[in-house]
Image: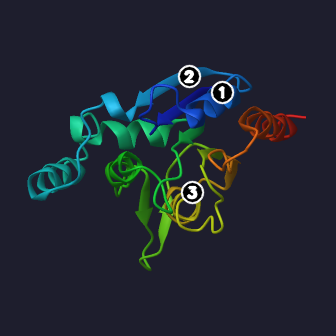
Amino acid sequence: MSVLFINGCVREKSRTKALADYLISKLDGEVIRVDLQNENIAPLDAQRLSERDSALLNKDTKHKILKYAVQFSNADIIVVASPFWDLSFSSLIKVYFENVTAVGVTFDYDKNGIPFGMCKAKKLYYVTTAGGQIFNKDFGYGYIRELCRSFYGIPQVEFISAQGLDIIGADVESIMDEAKKNIDKLFD
């Protein structure tokens, strides 16, 4: 079994990454790590979009532009880690999913134009931390959840978070411990 870890954390001592690492320690299988900060991943500008369209048209899934889409489609379990920034996730995560969403690799359309998933994974874990409170999960997590369910065919999407970490007087260690206990409950 393969566990694909998409790391959208940029800080050296990221609390989000620490929480994701704790989750990954509970999973069985070979962990494939994609540290987005160190990857050569870019938005789909006109040139890259043309390159991707050509690769998809020729069903060239070995083309470098489809690397992330093929890797994502073949994973058994996926873990996405990104801090909660500006009511969403890091821009690295948006660019990553822009590159992953590829017709004929991670999803396709039926004869009525309805998308259906082509991904192997049955579960994706979305891990985040926030300095304040996440009052509406639909901005970051909701976007990922809907991509998984509506496009990729990944039926189970779990939201894991530690919130209020930067509020004056917050007991950061206790908040992180509580988040880890919530992870433990997923595996009881």
Q: Is residue 98 left or right of residue 89?
A: left
Report which quarter residue 80 is drawn in: top right
**Closest to the observer, 21 or 78:** 21
Do the residues bearing badges 1 and 2 touch, measured as CB atoms within 8 Å? yes
Question: N-terminal of the two: label 1 or label 3?
Answer: 1
Estimate the x, y position of residue 148 in percent, counting from the top left: 55, 57
Mark 1–mark 3 Cα distance, whole angstroms, equals 22 Å
Task: Give the labeled residue for mark 3.
Answer: 153
Estimate the x, y position of residue 6 in percent, counting from the top left: 48, 36
Outermost residue toward the front? 169
**Closest to the observer, 4 or 122:** 4
**Closest to the observer, 59 or 29:** 29
Estimate the x, y position of residue 175 in percent, counting from the top left: 76, 40
Estimate the x, y position of residue 180 in percent, counting from the top left: 78, 34
**Mark 3 surroundings within 10 Å by alpha-carbon count, few (fewer than 14), some (14 through 19), many (20 or more):** many
Is residue 93 visible in the rendered image? The answer is yes
Amino acid on which the number 1 mark rests in the picture: Ile
Q: Residue at position x 53%, y 52% from top?
A: 84
Numbered tag placed on residue 24 in the rendering: 1
